[in-house]
Amino acid sequence: MLETRGNDFYLDGKKFNIYAGAVHYFRSFPEYWRDILLKLKLCGFNTVETYVCWNLHEMKEGEFDFSGNLDIVKFLETAKELGLYAIVRPGPYICSEWDFGGLPSWLLKDRNLRIRCMYQPYLDAVKRYYTELFRRISHLQYSNGGNIIAMQIENEYGSYGNDKNYLAYIRDLMLECGCTELLFTSDGAEDNMLSGGMLDGTLAVANFGSRVNEAFGTLRKYQPEGPLMCGEFWNGWFDHWGENAIHHSRAPEEVVAELKEMLKLDANFSFYMFHGGTNFGFNSGANNYGQYEPTVTSYDDDALLNEWGGYTRKYHEVRKVLLEHQGIAPTELPPEPELQNIGAVKLTQCASLLDSLDRIATKIESVNPECMEYYGQHGGLILYHKHLNGNYHGKLFLDGLADRAHIFINKELKGIIYRNDENNYITIDGLEGENDIDILVENMGRVNYGPNMLEGKGVRQIRINVQLLNNLDVYLIPLDNLNRLEYSGAKSCPEFLRGSFSAEPGKGCFVNMAGFGKGYVFVNGFNLGRYWNIGPQRSLYIPGVLLKDQNEVVVLELDGSTSDTVNISDRHDIGSGVSQSLLG
């Protein structure tokens, strides 16, 4: 098994260096795992590292799912077949620009919830999750003949808290559930983060993307002896909606320079990310440091392999250094993923969202407005309906809005409020007699990092001036049953737009959303994720495994479009012009 001796790792009694790359099984499809992992191996890495996404494995409390692209056992077994070791980071919190940092949204139904500390209801939920997870993966530990050589305790805990009792509890729970491999903590290479996140008697590793000697110097202040390891070497970065006109990128030359510094120190590392993949569906997270910043759908992350598994110049430059350092002769690489050009696809059918509530929403009578998590909803939209009788004028306030609301009076759009706007209200003209108010709220991703994570999606209260609106009809719209829609030719935003196209199964492509405002795209019932015309991302990835000879595309347009046609091609626009895979 893997152990530490002095400043080195030893595996089966022989000195060993961990050269890992992060690949998240849940951001891709099983059909692509072998190809991605083989490219990891042929690039000179010996280990794959992955988080485990509790929120998808236990979408409903007490009900677990480890099938399809959640089949972590198959993912790890595939890595083992290719001769790769594995590092597993089971959370329970994973950050990862992932919705709620990987914590299940149903936790938020508890009004007194506290996370990542010794709050007993949270610990009970974690214990149930860990028991189920370890029951499935324990046989894949190295001491049991598998390839898992190490596991992480929590994740960058020093960026959140300093409850050492909690960290010790997570460590002991992992041992109780059958963990036999090396345990470690992982934190940013800063004094306060290491001070809060380290655990006595446990190996600590540091996360950083530059200034190798400085970062390891900080780690050495707190851990004078032990293998040097960068738990997350940030060779790229992620994007927020509206943050920048271009996709974050990092020059291969910068990455290689830092890599060479780590190799000079005989250090160990994990490239974050080797392959980023995609935040399909409602899985993108968000940041909130005083202003809400939702993450885009693409998790390309400027990684060594791009979003669809194609090579980049960074891949080839890193590969050259790693292979030369280990004295490994390069071998032929697998071919690029096949892409296809479909062309223009006209969306010929329409269905009004407001007129379709009886088909795709669940109606609940509620005395007060509550967040979607309170009603047991994970993602999508929530609509608050109030039939108002009387004479009203002034301002309609949405207190505690999370995240973006369309306000309708008698089905006429009166305004859109985003939580970052200066004002959380619209002015209403005199309402006399009977009127219907509909407030459609979009969940744009739960905060995944920092102190502002405990937030439900929807509105906390609705009021006209100082008068609260009570006794509402609440419609839960998870967008998971669009097959129940009835289409016509009439346009009425927000609306579902449907078209069809022919394709070659197995070949990927990208749907460009030029001419559209904000919303979601579904292909053959699968939610590709969010689009928004503020960028930087302009197109969405369609994995080839989703495609058939004849295909359906459905666009939920929330703000209104200037086009009735999407373009599906072999070119991906994620903000830095058009990105293409590189052979070379």
Image (tube, rainbow, N blue to C red):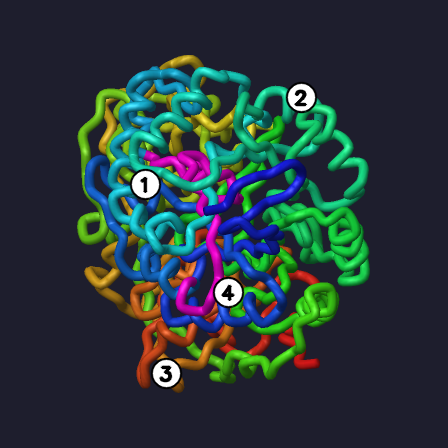
Residue that numbered label 3 is attached to: 505
- Asked if labels 2 and 3 touch by Cβ distance under 8 angstroms, the answer is no
Of the two numbered discs 1 and 3 on the same chain, state the one appearing first in sequence.
1
| Residue in front for this viewpoint, 157 or 63 | 157
Work out whether 222 lies above or below 566: above
> At label 1, which amino acid type do we have?
His
Point out the stretch of residues depicted in magenta.
Answer: 80-105
Of the two numbered discs 4 and 1 on the same chain, state the one appearing first in sequence.
1
Q: CA distance from mark 3 to mark 2?
A: 51 Å
Of the two numbered discs 1 and 2 on the same chain, state the one appearing first in sequence.
2
Q: Which mark is residue 192?
A: 2
Mark 3 Cα shell of 10 Å, populated few (<14), some (14-19), many (≥20): some
> At label 4, which amino acid type do we have?
Leu
Query: Picture coordinates of residue 204 (x, y %)?
Result: 59, 32
Mark 4 Cα shell of 10 Å, populated few (<14), some (14-19), many (≥20): many
Query: Picture coordinates of residue 467 (x, y %)?
Result: 37, 14
What residue sits 75% from the left and 30% below the top? 218
Q: CA distance from mark 1 to mark 2?
A: 34 Å
> At label 3, which amino acid type do we have?
Pro
**Residue 447 visible to an observer of this rendering:** no
Residue that numbered label 1 is attached to: 378
Number of the front mark, 1 or 3: 3
Work out whether 105 lies above or below 505: above
Q: Quadrant of residue 583?
A: bottom right
Query: Picture coordinates of residue 562 (x, y %)?
Result: 53, 65
- Asked if labels 1 and 4 touch by Cβ distance under 8 angstroms, the answer is no
Of the two numbered discs 4 and 3 on the same chain, state the one appearing first in sequence.
3
